[in-house]
């Protein structure tokens, strides 16, 4: 039986992702680690309208009947938990960040907030970019070094101790990309305001 | 070699022999330094059944791979031994200057074995190591000893014990730089049992930093983060650690009168705000620390460092005392006698309850501020009522026939957070390897302060994962060795990258946390080897059975049992709390599987 408090956390973050334009109606997913168990969104459920039965509990390493119901990205979430200290994962489809990921191998923020919080976001490429073991391995390896990464043309995976924290990184990334897009439209030379700016790309 | 100096100094006080040996670099990679390296060395040095106060016990002083590099708070050292208070594995660490200076002597660790026939002190200088007569120092208090041995913060640093350590109190601290302490679990008594009064260090070496450019960037980023965090840039500098007192009291998690209540009606009188307004002379800081939480305070009778939050709580709310001047004076006395203030204060609180119940013949009563100083003096000398209290609350309460009135885990007195109002904190205490302690991870960040994000403090399901992560992270930080306040602004990923820059060995965040997990499991194995069992992973009966009577935590007891089951499963331990062979193998601890 999943604690009501945990369900509420999923509902709040799921709704915010949808209303913030970070996912389509049925896109994205959320999970948390509970020891040797994982709680993840049901396959096909709408994150913006989660019901208690939309949360599926299954094993972290071992399959059980829960896998028949879980999100197609379960394999990725499991790999992340097995390879990082993460206790929560947020996967969403931030539109501006996805657009930038199509032409860059890494995203180095130009705004203060994302420079401060994220430093740099690597872009990972995988042809089978949805629920494949190859994708799971690449995403988990990248998240061993970074708290948020982009899967080229697909979306972001962020980790944290809580869903709240992983959502924070996700929304910060999208905000940063929107700022950069706006700056490109303005198209004027930057006046640097940060110290050690070049070092962010070494992160 | 980056970060490490590559040498271990071994001193046998029984024979007078000193020896330098190379640091096992594979061991260093796996355990880093500080608490981790200390636990690994202790595993080999002190086998099961050794009396902690016998010559067969050892003292292992360690610094970490970041110590002395100039990284924020890289001033600390750690001391590991078998605890006379708990019988468990023990490490305690301390800030100030001594740790930095110890690193400059060119050693990563100092192992002290045996027992001197008469009082001695050790002097480690660039021109050699000496064991010197300390007869003239024996019996002297900490301040005087430190001064007589020539303390000079940036050049020559003194670590010593006071009368509490000499008289083998199981709550005795090791003091350094005059008023800093590695206190919990009684390491000062182990030092006293060896007739070792002091260790003086002078050095001129510096650790190498492999990737200077990245290290500079990490320094820059940490400075920015520590400035940005209101905790590290405003709250701690302005009010000291006692800034927590109001916060913890407000949510109904400040243990009061030996944990009979969870809110102190006079919290205002002993708060960080009151300390700053009425008694603060100035702030001070440890070497390479930009936070500066140290208080220099003054009353009509004393002037000196402190008190910290835990001390203020132990002599304040826990004893039902709202006389802040008396608390400051008790703290100063503990520093001079060489006592752990948490255990000393909580033991006095236990004695107050026992006395009120007519089970102990003393004048101690809740609120009797006037008896703090004379009781501490008596404890240090083992005189009168002090003889009853000198070895902690569990031994005291057991002799009075009511062991459940000692607020301890594994014999170590609990600190200033009531597990009934912070469910995760209770699990953390119960599973702490050195006993009831808030420095083996602390749920204050997650359950109260919202660091990194606030979680429900009463939630039980899923709480174990947070506790385990923070226990592992704490073990890693204690092995670097950094101050825990640094991670109120700087996250684990920064520590991992800084360690990589200094050592040239790539540590991902997960590698660092896994190192902490390795250390935690090794410590667990040590305790199992000593005979500790699942039954020792518990809390005082009062916290499990007596609901909080009023306030924001009203009606709650600790829901330990379901959290503990989930904790063992998540740790990869069996139902008895024994690490499974597969877990040990995965942590490169396969050699220790025979214990499991």
Image: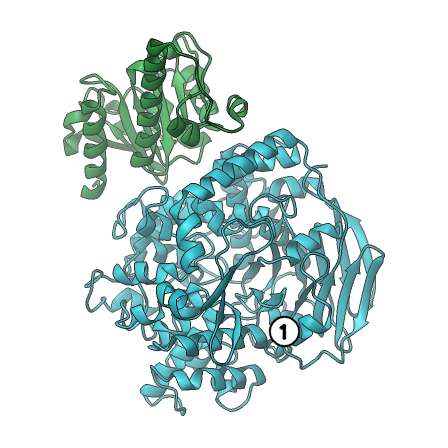
Image quadrant of residue B576? bottom left
Q: Nearer the viewer, residue A91 or B294?
A: B294
Q: Residue furthest right?
A: B127
Residue A153 visible, this orientation: no
Examine the rendered structure and indicate whether residue B550 appears above or below residue B477.
below
* Chain appearing in cyan on the rendered image: B
Chain hosting mark 1: B
Percent of width and height locating residue B358? 33, 90
Q: How is the image coloured?
A: by chain
Q: Nearer the viewer, residue B488 or B428?
A: B488
Q: Nearer the viewer, residue B216 or B120?
A: B216
* Chain appearing in green on the rendered image: A
- At horizontal 44% and vertical 82% (from top left) the residue drawn is B372
Residue B523 visible, this orientation: yes
Image quadrant of residue B238? bottom left
- At horizontal 18% and vertical 28% (from top left) the residue drawn is A15
Examine the rendered structure and indicate whether residue B105 appears above or below residue A114.
below
Tally of numbered tags: 1
Q: Nearer the viewer, residue B483 or A63?
A: B483
């Amino acid at each position: 039986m999943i604690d009501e408090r945990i369900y509420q956390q999923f509902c709040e973050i799921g709704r915010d992702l949808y209303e913030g334009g970070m996912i389509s109606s049925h896109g994205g997913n959320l999970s948390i680690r509970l020891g040797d168990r994982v709680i993840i969104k049901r396959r096909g459920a709408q994150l913006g309208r989660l019901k208690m039965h939309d949360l599926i509990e299954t094993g972290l390493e071992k399959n059980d009947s829960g896998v028949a119901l879980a999100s197609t990205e379960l394999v990725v979430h499991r790999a992340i938990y097995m390879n990082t200290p993460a206790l929560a994962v947020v996967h969403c489809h931030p539109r501006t960040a996805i657009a930038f990921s199509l032409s860059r191998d890494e995203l180095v923020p130009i705004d203060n907030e994302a420079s401060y919080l994220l430093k740099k976001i690597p872009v990972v490429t995988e042809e089978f970019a949805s629920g494949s073991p190859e994708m799971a391995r690449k995403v988990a390896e990248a998240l061993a070094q970074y708290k948020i990464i982009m899967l080229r043309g697909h979306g972001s995976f962020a980790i944290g101790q809580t869903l709240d924290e992983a959502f924070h990184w996700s929304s910060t990334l999208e905000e940063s990309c929107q700022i950069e897009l706006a700056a490109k439209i303005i198209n004027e030379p930057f006046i640097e305001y940060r110290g050690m700016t070049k070092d962010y790309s070494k992160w | 070699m980056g970060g490490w100096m590559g040498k271990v100094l071994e001193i046998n006080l029984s024979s007078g022999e000193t020896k330098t040996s190379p640091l096992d670099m594979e061991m260093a990679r796996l355990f880093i330094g500080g608490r981790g390296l200390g636990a690994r060395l202790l595993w080999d040095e002190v086998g099961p059944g050794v009396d902690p106060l016998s010559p067969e016990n050892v003292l292992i002083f360690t610094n970490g791979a970041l110590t002395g590099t100039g990284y924020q708070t890289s001033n600390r050292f750690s001391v590991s031994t078998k605890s006379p208070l708990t019988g468990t594995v023990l490490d305690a660490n301390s800030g100030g200057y001594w740790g930095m200076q110890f690193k400059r002597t060119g050693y990563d660790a100092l192992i002290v074995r045996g027992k001197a026939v008469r009082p001695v002190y050790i002097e480690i200088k660039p021109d050699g190591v000496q064991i010197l007569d300390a007869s003239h120092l024996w019996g002297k208090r900490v301040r005087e000893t430190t001064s007589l041995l020539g303390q000079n913060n940036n050049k020559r640093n003194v670590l010593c014990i006071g009368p509490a350590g000499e008289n083998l109190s199981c709550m005795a601290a090791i003091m350094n730089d005059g008023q800093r302490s590695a206190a919990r679990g009684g390491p000062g008594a182990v030092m006293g049992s060896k007739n070792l009064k002091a260790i003086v260090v002078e050095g001129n070496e510096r650790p190498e930093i492999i990737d200077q450019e990245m290290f500079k960037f990490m320094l820059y980023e940490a400075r920015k983060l520590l400035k940005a965090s209101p905790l590290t840039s405003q709250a701690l500098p302005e009010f000291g650690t006692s800034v927590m007192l109001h916060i913890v009291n407000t949510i109904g998690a400040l243990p009061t009168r030996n944990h009979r209540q969870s809110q102190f009606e006079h919290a205002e009188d002993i708060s960080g705000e009151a300390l700053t307004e009425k008694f603060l002379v100035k702030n001070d800081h440890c070497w390479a620390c930009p936070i500066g939480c140290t208080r220099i305070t003054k009353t009509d009778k004393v002037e000196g460092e402190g008190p910290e939050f835990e001390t203020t709580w132990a002599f304040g709310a826990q004893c039902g005392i709202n006389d802040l001047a008396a608390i400051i004076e008790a703290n100063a006395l503990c520093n001079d006698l060489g006592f752990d203030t948490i255990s000393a204060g909580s033991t006095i609180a236990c004695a107050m309850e026992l006395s009120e119940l007519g089970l102990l013949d003393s004048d101690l009563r809740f609120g009797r501020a006037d008896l703090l100083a004379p009781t501490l003096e008596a404890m240090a000398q083992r005189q009168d009522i002090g003889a009853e209290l000198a070895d902690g609350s569990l031994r005291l309460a057991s002799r009075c026939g009511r062991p459940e009135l000692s607020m301890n885990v594994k014999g170590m007195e609990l600190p200033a957070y009531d597990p009934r109002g912070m469910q995760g904190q209770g699990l953390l205490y119960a599973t702490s390897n050195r006993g009831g302690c808030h420095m083996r991870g602390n749920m204050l960040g997650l359950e109260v302060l919202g660091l990194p994000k606030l979680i429900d403090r009463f939630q039980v399901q899923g709480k174990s994962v947070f506790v385990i992560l923070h226990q592992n992270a704490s073990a890693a930080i204690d092995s670097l060795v950094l101050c825990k306040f640094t991670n109120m602004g700087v996250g684990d990923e920064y520590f991992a990258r800084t360690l990589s820059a200094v050592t040239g060995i790539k540590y991902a965040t997960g590698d660092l946390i896994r190192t902490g997990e390795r250390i935690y499991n090794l410590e667990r194995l040590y305790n199992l080897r000593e005979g500790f069992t699942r039954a020792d992973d518990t809390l005082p009966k009062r916290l499990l059975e007596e609901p909080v009577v009023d306030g924001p935590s009203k009606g709650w007891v600790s829901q330990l049992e379901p959290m503990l089951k989930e904790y063992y499963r998540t740790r990869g331990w069996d139902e008895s709390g024994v690490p499974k062979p597969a877990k040990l193998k995965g942590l490169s601890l396969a050699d220790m599987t025979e214990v499991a």
